Image (cartoon, rainbow, N blue to C red):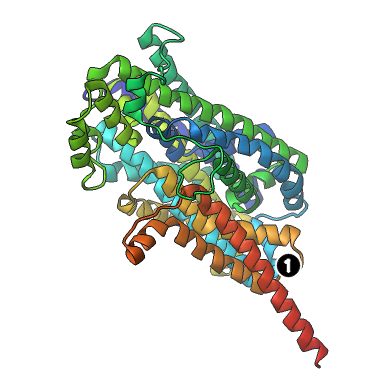
Amino acid sequence: MRDNLSPLDVLVVVAYMLWMLAIGIYYSRRQTDTSEYFLGRRSMNWLIVGISTMATLISTITYLTMPGEVIANGFGVLWSQLSVWIAFFFVGYLIIPRIMSHKITSGYQLLEKQFGIRIRKAAACLFVLTRVTWTGLVVYTCSRAVSQMTGWSLEVVILVVGIITVSYTTMGGIRAVIATDVTQAFILFGGALLVVGFAMYSARSVVSWFPNFHDPVISAGLSWPDVKFFSLNLTDRITVVGIIVMYIVWWIATASSDQLAIQRYLSTRDANAARKSFLTNAVANTIVVLVLTLCGAALIGFFIRNQTLIPPAEELLRNAKPGVLEEVRKMLNDLPDLQGRLYVLKRGADDVFPWFIAHILPAGLSGVLIAALFSAAMSSVSSGVNSITTVLMVDFAGMFRAARDERHRVKQARLTGIFVGMVAILVSFTQHLIHGNFMEVAQKINGFFIAPMAALFIMAFFMKSTNAAGAWAAIASGFLTGVVISYYGEISKLLTGNEVKVSFMYILPFSLVVCLVAGYLVSLIRNKLKSIHSSTR
């Protein structure tokens, strides 16, 4: 077991960072107009775009929480991978053709015809809030993990990740973003494979590295919750039907309303190419998530075989909520040795993977995994900064001075990107205030903002009788529903004294349904009132 990173690890990380900057510098020479800067002249290869989208959506949050989710709660989350294949038919054949039939740069331009300029700008604002918050969370998640692994200052790591990512993003535009995304996709995938390979090597077997989860001691130590197929009990954390439905809604919502995804489609030649890019994303996403799930199993198996290497509770739970460490210490007094050690792993699940990278992997491999963590974060951050910049430049064009020519317009875009990056970095400094499983935190953000955005696009595409009044109702009701479900436990405790938490699975689906129902009903009432008013004239 190692206590510090080796010079070789540091060299690997530095080489990775310089490589990303070099890509940004290379593509900076091509940026002569905004069509190239934002969309790559709509000529990007669908395979590259699909891999880029996968890398963007597999953020550090996913990269760290998937192994942690397996350690803490088992393999139930794997059911979510069925959702992308169900969503593909809806997205590929109903959503993408409607988007690609318009020569637009920002997806929110599609909302103006039916709902007016105010709704277009409101949707753009929701997107900016979502992605800035998300980007800050991604930077913080990555930086916290790297800081714990290396002993480097958290603030310094945040600044390094933010500054380097913003630099190559603003220099090279969408081509640099996609090129670095593809590079980062292979690094993060290779890093996950290395962990599984190391587990096999340490077990001297391609089979026995996988734990026997039916062993009574192992099962008791991990104490995974049972995953029901279906349940009407909203407090059940995960059910098969619930997790599939949640992620179907997430895929459709993201694909139809998130500028990050829409901009990827628009960078390809036509609807067929955009559809292929989504399919590529689905295939790549499924493969990476499966490997990350195996990482979780590999970590459990490694520590079962090497029990003395399991970190003490004081180290693994140093970032836990107040009182958690004391609770774990009390439990350890009543548990057998292995069962107690596994219980510690379960309670500190989100920090097991980073600790393993820093202390167990040999020199060089740790550097590759740290580069993989940076890759997972920087691919999301670069795409976020680029897409937010696009929305600000297109949907809020009135904020900018009229450009003399396209080169000056590109300069404005670069300066805007730098500003967006600075804001995202500042937001990341506030994320330490968030407690809880990062997967659940991410779903709260989805419920607050993504559901109202998705509702607007679904209404615009498929509910032609809806109007601006209904759109406003959808935004307000969806946001309120997301807040209530996300914090139902805190609300119920305040009102009744009993804390009853609703599963994170229901935040996004329930919010979206409420949005659509409210949008339709208010639009119907508004249309009836207009009809009555017109008939009385």
Residue 268 in the image, given as x and y percentages of width and height: 70, 41
Q: In this view, does 468 lie above or below 516?
A: below
Tag 1: residue type? Lys
Q: In this view, does 175 lie to the left or right of 206?
A: right
Quadrant for the N terminus, please.
top left
Residue 144 appears in the figure: yes
Q: Which one is in front, 100 or 350? A: 350
Q: Where is residue 178 in the image (x, y as percent from the top left)?
A: 57, 38
Quarter of the figure with residue 92: top right
Q: Confirm whether residue 187 shows in the render.
A: no
The residue at the point 51 percent across, 37 percent down is 228
The front one of 253 and 36 is: 253
* Quadrant of the rendering where the C terminus is positioned: bottom right
Q: Which residue lies furthest to the bottom in this view?
A: 537
The secondary element bearing badge 1 is classed as helix
Looking at the image, residue 119 lies above or below residue 361: below
Which residue is at a point 64% across and 44% down the rendered structure image?
Answer: 264
Tag 1 residue: 113
**Number of marks present in the image shown:** 1
Residue at the extreme top: 204
Vertical side of 503 occupied by 347: above or below: above
Q: In this view, does 302 lie to the left or right of 318?
A: right
Q: Which residue is painted at 17% across and 31% down in the image?
A: 333
Instruction: Give x and y (percent) for residue 467.
Output: 70, 71
Q: Check disc 1: other Cα within 10 Å, few if <14, some if 14-19, many if 20+.
A: few
In the rendered image, residue 417, in percent from the top left (x then y), is placed at 49, 53
